[in-house]
């Protein structure tokens, strides 16, 4: 699939090419030009929409994909990490705003909602991309067998009929 099919536009021609800036920094720059409360509310709604879009995309390309490949998994992990980063940035902005505006209770309520979503994202990250020991759907007996292999507690297997 080409870059244009994936939604990437070619960089401007010339000696220097423009960088793609992570969303969290774009949000910071937008903050400078808007009313902070309305910016925060808009950024929070955008983040919630991005979460919904991520979930729908993950269902299609990861969770229900019988032909999932490494690119699908890397895209999933990257998306999770970006959403976690953006959520943390947003929570920090809410806490700073609440402190400056003298309205910490309102900010804390929104940060608690963000934290609930972040917990889900982190659990998903560890469940899909963490070590096998962190995978809730892998049987404990299999995890124990892997630990024994790592510790060198493996016996040679004699084929039936050998030595007889």
Image (cartoon, rainbow, N blue to C red):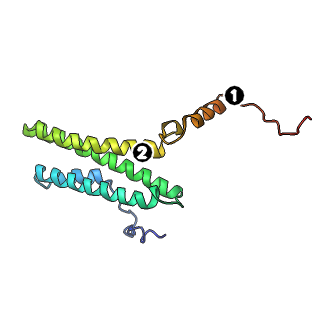
Which mark is on residue 66?
Answer: none
Q: Quadrant of residue 18?
A: bottom left
Q: 137 or 42: nearer the eye?
A: 137
Residue 18 against residue 158 in the figure, above or below:
below
| Rendered location of residue 79, percent (x, y) | 39, 53
Q: Is residue 139 left or right of residue 10?
A: right
Residue situated furthest left in the rendering: 102
| Rendered location of residue 47, percent (x, y) | 26, 53
| Rendered location of residue 54, percent (x, y) | 35, 56
Residue 32 visible, this orientation: no
Label 2 near label 1: C-beta < 8 Å?
no
Residue 7 against residue 105 in the figure, above or below:
below
Q: Secondary structure at mark 1?
A: loop
Residue at image position (17%, 55%) is: 42
Dot 1 or dot 2: first in sequence order is 2
Q: 10 or 102: nearer the eye?
A: 102
**Quadrant, the C terminus:** top right
Q: Residues within 10 Å of mark 1 (few under 14, many from 20)?
A: few
Residue 72 against residue 140 in the figure, above or below:
below
Q: Residues within 10 Å of mark 2 (few under 14, many from 20)?
A: some
Q: Is residue 30 left or right of residue 164?
A: left
Q: Secondary structure at mark 2?
A: helix
Residue 107 visible, this orientation: yes
Residue at image position (8%, 38%) is: 103
Residue with the mark numbered 2 = 125
Residue with the mark numbered 1 = 153
């Amino acid at each position: 699939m080409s870059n244009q099919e994936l939604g990437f536009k070619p960089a401007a021609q010339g000696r220097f090419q423009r960088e793609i800036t992570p969303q969290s920094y774009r949000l910071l720059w937008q903050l400078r030009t808007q009313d902070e409360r309305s910016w925060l509310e808009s950024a929070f709604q955008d983040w919630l929409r991005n979460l919904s879009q991520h979930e729908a995309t993950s269902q299609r390309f990861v969770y229900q994909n019988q032909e999932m490949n490494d690119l699908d998994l890397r895209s999933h992990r990257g998306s999770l990490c970006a959403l976690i980063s953006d959520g943390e940035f947003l929570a920090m902005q809410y806490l700073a705003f609440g402190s400056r505006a003298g309205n910490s209770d309102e900010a804390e309520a929104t940060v608690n909602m963000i934290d609930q979503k972040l917990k889900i994202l982190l659990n998903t990250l560890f469940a899909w991309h963490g070590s096998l020991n962190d995978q809730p759907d892998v049987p404990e007996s299999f995890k124990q067998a892997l630990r024994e292999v790592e510790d060198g507690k493996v016996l040679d297997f004699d084929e039936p009929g050998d030595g007889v």
